[in-house]
Image (spheres, helix red, strand yellow):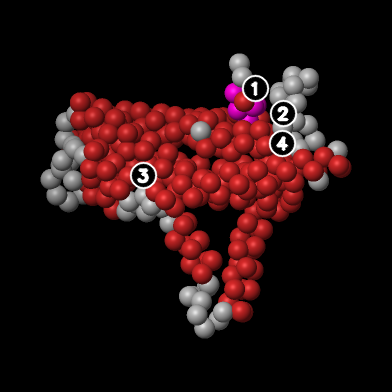
């Protein structure tokens, strides 16, 4: 096994609590809540209009769960990068192989790669599992609530596959888009530890205030820097497309949604962000190698 893969494995082992065990616990809680709702008979409700198919109910539930999982993922990733880059700077060895020290750049790069691949993959698997739970619930619900229409197994399976395909595309592009922000927080954490969380926000604000002080009349609201960051923080995808697809009578058009998602990405900006991420990781590794090791 290559040294870099071992470093990735170490990141998973050290952070499996937030990215593996916690999602499993949340899935168990969700399953128990759904089961208790059916067993207790508290699923009764009324609505106006004709009955809807079970798989349409599943579409809305699965998409809603997806937004919750992505919010959880990006929040946990933010704090992962704010801590992981500083937590083990006294020891660059791989797991228990103390005779195989790695360079600082390799250590930090492994943390960046793990935060953009392995760790989000765990959350995506949790998302797929909750989709299976939601699918089972949507197939059972019409048996308890006849107004929902007959269970539609093929339609539910197709909806699960379609939404999963759109979700994985969205997740990959969003992670690449926000990679420079994660790298920025991680780079700050090499010097400031958990203080990188507020500093990641304070530093751009201070630079923007300085920018406005020297170019007050010409700078846009908040300054050029904050204007750029506001634009960069907004991942260009209209969630209304998913909502309309979920509540329409036709099955979700995977090709159309993925096409809109890919077409909406500013690819030069995404590539520039990845280059920025690599540069700040390199600078952080040099700081870690030259400054922090002197205190080890």
| 136 on left or right of 113 | left
Q: Report the residue that reaches farthest toward the bottom.
A: 217
Instruction: Check disc 1 and report the residue beneath it.
Output: 3
Instruction: Check disc 2 and report the residue beneath it.
Output: 102
Q: Position of residue 290 (x, y in %)?
A: 79, 43
- Rounded to the nearest angstrom, the CA distance separating label 4 from label 2 is 7 Å
Instruction: Check disc 3 and report the residue beneath it.
Output: 64
Residue at position x 41%, y 29% in the image = 129
Instruction: Check disc 4 and report the residue beneath it.
Output: 104
Element at label 4: helix
- Rounded to the nearest angstrom, the CA distance separating label 1 from label 4 is 13 Å
Residue at position x 66%, y 30% in the image = 14
Quadrant of residue 113 within the rendered picture: top right
Tell whether label 2 touches label 1 (CB within 8 Å).
yes
Tell whether label 1 touches label 3 (CB within 8 Å).
no
Tell whether label 4 touches label 1 (CB within 8 Å).
no
Element at label 3: helix
- Rounded to the nearest angstrom, the CA distance separating label 2 from label 3 is 42 Å
Segment tinted magenta in the rendering: 5-11
């Amino acid at each position: 096994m290559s040294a870099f893969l071992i470093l990735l494995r170490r990141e998973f082992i050290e952070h499996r609590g937030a990215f593996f065990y916690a999602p499993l616990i949340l899935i168990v809680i969700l399953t128990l809540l759904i089961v208790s709702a059916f067993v207790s008979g508290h699923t009764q409700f009324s609505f106006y209009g004709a009955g809807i198919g079970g798989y349409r109910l599943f579409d809305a539930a699965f998409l809603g769960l997806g937004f919750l999982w992505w919010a959880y993922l990006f929040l946990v990733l933010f704090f992962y990068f704010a801590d992981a880059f500083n937590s083990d700077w006294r020891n660059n060895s791989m797991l228990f192989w103390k005779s195989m020290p790695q360079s600082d750049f390799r250590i930090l790069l492994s943390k960046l790669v793990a935060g953009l691949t392995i760790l989000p993959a765990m959350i995506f698997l949790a998302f797929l599992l909750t989709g299976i739970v939601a699918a089972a619930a949507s197939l059972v619900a019409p048996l308890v609530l006849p107004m929902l229409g007959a269970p539609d197994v093929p339609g539910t399976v197709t909806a699960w596959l379609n939404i999963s395909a759109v979700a994985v595309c969205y997740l990959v592009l969003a992670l690449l888009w926000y990679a420079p922000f994660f790298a920025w927080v991680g780079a700050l954490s090499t010097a400031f530890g958990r203080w990188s969380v507020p500093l990641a926000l304070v530093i751009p604000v201070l630079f923007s205030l300085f920018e406005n002080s020297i170019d007050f009349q010409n700078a846009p609201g908040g300054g050029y820097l904050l204007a750029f960051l506001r634009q960069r923080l907004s991942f260009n995808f209209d969630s209304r497309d998913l909502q309309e697809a979920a509540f329409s009578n036709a099955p979700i058009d995977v090709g159309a949604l993925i096409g809109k998602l890919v077409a909406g990405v500013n690819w030069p900006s995404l590539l520039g962000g990845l280059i920025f991420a690599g540069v700040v990781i390199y600078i952080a590794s040099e700081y870690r190698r030259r400054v922090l090791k002197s205190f080890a």
